[in-house]
Amino acid sequence: MKSSAIAPTNIAFIKYWGRKDEALRLPVNGSISMNLSSLTTTTTVEFSDTFLSDKITIGGVSNAKESSRVVEHLDRIRALAKVSTKAKVISENSFPTGTGLSSSASGFAALTVAATTALGLLLSEKELSILARQGSGSACRSIPDGWVEWLDGDTSDSSFAQSIFPAEHWDIIDVVAVVSSGRKDVPTSEGQKLVNTSPFQKARSGGMKQKIDDIKRAITVRDFTLFGEIIEAEALNMHAVMLTSQPSLIYWSAGTLEVMKLCKTWRSEGLEVYFTINTGQDVHLLCLLSAKEALMKKLKQLDFVKDIIVSTPTKGTTVSNRHLF
Ligand code: PMV
């Protein structure tokens, strides 16, 4: 009754921001992402009749708010397995939590696979993705391998993620420039609820289908310039909605803006790199593997960049033999 799983987080190139169904976490649009090799969560879950209550520890801390979302997810999984057994959950991230590096994606993907395996549920990848989505939307994209599309769907059963290419399809790297270790003030789940208060959301939704087709084409033919132009414009488009929500959501800091501007300067000097940003201050920089050393050299010269995390595309969530207790 004890199992562990390791899950990568993922970076969305076409983003999920806003839900058409809050309870089921159905997104207003589909999204496209890539799993990240260096940003992972490992989770061990044990169910036992000797436990009187669920005990959740994330990064060595038991926090009531985070625990309640985990317990809700355990309840979904217990309902599927038709049991009421309590669980012990220990989860560790390979990176800082709550700073915008999408720990909820890897966290809920790892929890879904560890808990269903511990209860002996034999679920398909699609079923695991649907289940993970209900814990945290973006978690559904961390289940399949490599390059992933989340189909928005109109029902729970039709809203899931699937691999569009394996990790090896394209030698692209994601380099996170960590500019802050502070936690964000408005959690992503709360921020998402404000999407329709922005006057720009209607325009954003209108262009989504075309954008998804365009980026899939860029990935298919490995056109890095087209890919980069789309992802940077898309990140700014999503942040335009956030900035103009009521109340406004400003997830950037001075360091975020500095890296965004430098990225454009470096590009004008011949280093082909593009940025994307989620709900945090840290910036994801995308470049071809061949440009890695040149980019690292630039970033290492910036004293406000506190850490640099390099990831390659990687496989999805897997069962692990490494138990945390
Ligand atoms: O799954 P959530 O609630 O953590 O939302 C993720 C939202 C973004 O990271 C901003 C965009 C995305 O598609 O990952």
Image (cartoon, helix red, strand yellow):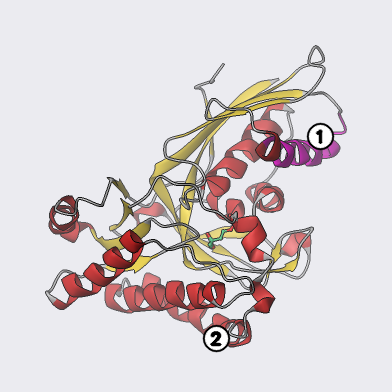
State the image coordinates of residue 290 (x, y, percent, origin top left). 17, 59
Local secondary structure at mark 2: loop
Residue 89 is drawn in which quadrant?
Answer: top right
Task: Please tell me which residue is depicted at 63% across the width and 28% down the height of the picture.
Answer: 62
Q: Which residue is mark 1?
A: 78
Local secondary structure at mark 1: helix
Residue 207 circle label: 2
Label 2 CB-ligand 1 distance < 8 A = no
- Decide whether residue 265 is among the magenta residues: no
Residue 70 is drawn in which quadrant?
Answer: top right
Residue 157 seen from this side? yes
**Mark 1: amino acid:** Arg
**Mark 2: amino acid:** Gly
Task: Please tell me which residue is depicted at 47% across the width and 61% down the height of the picture.
Answer: 278
* Range covered by the magenta-colored residues: 67-83
- Decide whether residue 75 is among the magenta residues: yes
Task: Please tell me which residue is depicted at 69% across the width and 66% down the height of the picture.
Answer: 193
Residue extending furthest toward the top: 50
* The C terminus lies in quadrant: top right
Q: Going by the image, does 246 lie left or right of 215?
A: right
State the image coordinates of residue 128 (x, y, percent, origin top left). 67, 46
Residue 34 is drawn in which quadrant?
Answer: bottom left
